[in-house]
Amino acid sequence: MGKTLEERIGILEDIEEIKKLKARYLYAIDDGDWDSVLDCFSEDAKVDYGLWGRYEGRMEIEKFFKELFPPHYSLHHHVTHDPLIEIDGDKARGRWNLDEAATIAKGSKAIWISGRYDDEYVKESKGWKYKSISVKFFYVTPYEEGWGKRRMIDLDYLTS
Amino acid sequence: MSDNIEERVRMLEDIEEIRQLKSRYVYSLDERDWDGVLDFFAEDAKVDFGAFGKFESKKEIGKFFKETFPPVATFTMHMTQDPIIKIDGDRAKGKWYMHESMTFKEGNRAAWGAVKYEDEFVRRGGKWKCIHSLVQIIYLTPYKEGWAKKRMIF
């Protein structure tokens, strides 16, 4: 193996911390606790949320979460699966599957979402933070139709 | 649980490695990376995929994934949950729930699936591989109908 016992334990602990970071981030989104969401990011973090847009730096990410994102939804429930986490000193990468039930506020329209996260993390003085998040969506589909009939809504669906 | 810290750390590493091995298997499935899928299995692996068939070697498993399965389903999204992994030296057992959304090519029909895996693993040359995989399909239901109306799409 080549690593000391201390290093090996450190890696296992880092993996667990990153799992908790992901969980805190998603619980906070589902609770609408935007300050806790922002606390998950490093200052110069970048995000790519697919059809929801790309944002650079904590200020832009804050604007997205506090102003652009919330008005359209009355419900989110994010669930992740199958984390693949690789630790490299004070940096790490993670991949996750995502499953989500959501309700669009206008018209109370239920949608199912399925996607994949590819993340980068950095270990700062206050713990592990997101350096970047990139989401690829497999489907964002109205409940009544399902992914067989309509795989992806467009942003007009939020306001129609 | 051993008093030996080296053994305890090794066990935690083995559990994490097997968890990630299973996750790489499902990512490969959904990406249609069949070589990546086969990397999950030992050469002498046997599988029982329920209604999808039983296969007695990595060669037969490869034929299923490369030839039989792809024309049937145009889209799959597999997600595993709730692993219970037990290590016993160079052997291990793992149990998972898995749920999936998929689309069957015939009729472009969306379906929901829920499955229980009971897998056995062996460590050879320092790497864990699956030696046996047993799938119990809990439901595989047309999207519109749901598991209460029609549990199995077959």
Image (cartoon, coloured by chain):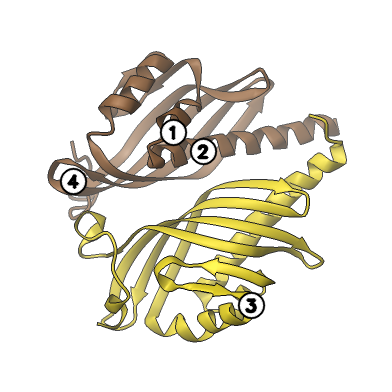
Chain colours: A yellow, B brown
* Amino acid on which disc 2 is placed: Arg
- Separation of residues labelled 3 and 4 (CA atoms): 48 Å
Q: Nearer the viewer, mark 3 or mark 4?
A: 3
* Chain containing mark 1: B
Q: Does label 3 lie on the same chain as label 2? A: no
Which of the pair A43/B103 is nearer the observer? A43
Residue type beneath disc 1: Tyr
Instruction: Identify the subunit bearing mark 2.
Output: B
Answer whether labels 2 and 3 touch (C-beta < 8 Å).
no
- Residue shown at 55% from the left, 51% from the top: A95
Whole-percent x and y of residue B104? Answer: 21, 42
Q: Nearer the viewer, mark 2 or mark 3?
A: 3
Which residue in the protein does label 4 denote? B150
Residue drawn at point x = 39 percent, y = 15 percent: B59
The circle on residue A58 is 3
Q: CA gap, disc 1 to disc 2?
A: 15 Å
Tag 3 subunit: A
Residue of label 2: B24
Q: Quadrant of the C terminus of chain A?
A: bottom left
Q: How many neighbours does mark 4 have within 10 angstroms: few (below 14), some (14-19), or many (20 or more)?
A: some
Q: Quick check: do tags 1 and 2 share a chain?
A: yes
- Label 1 element class: strand
Identify the element where label 2 is drawn.
Answer: helix
Q: CA distance from mark 1 to mark 4?
A: 22 Å
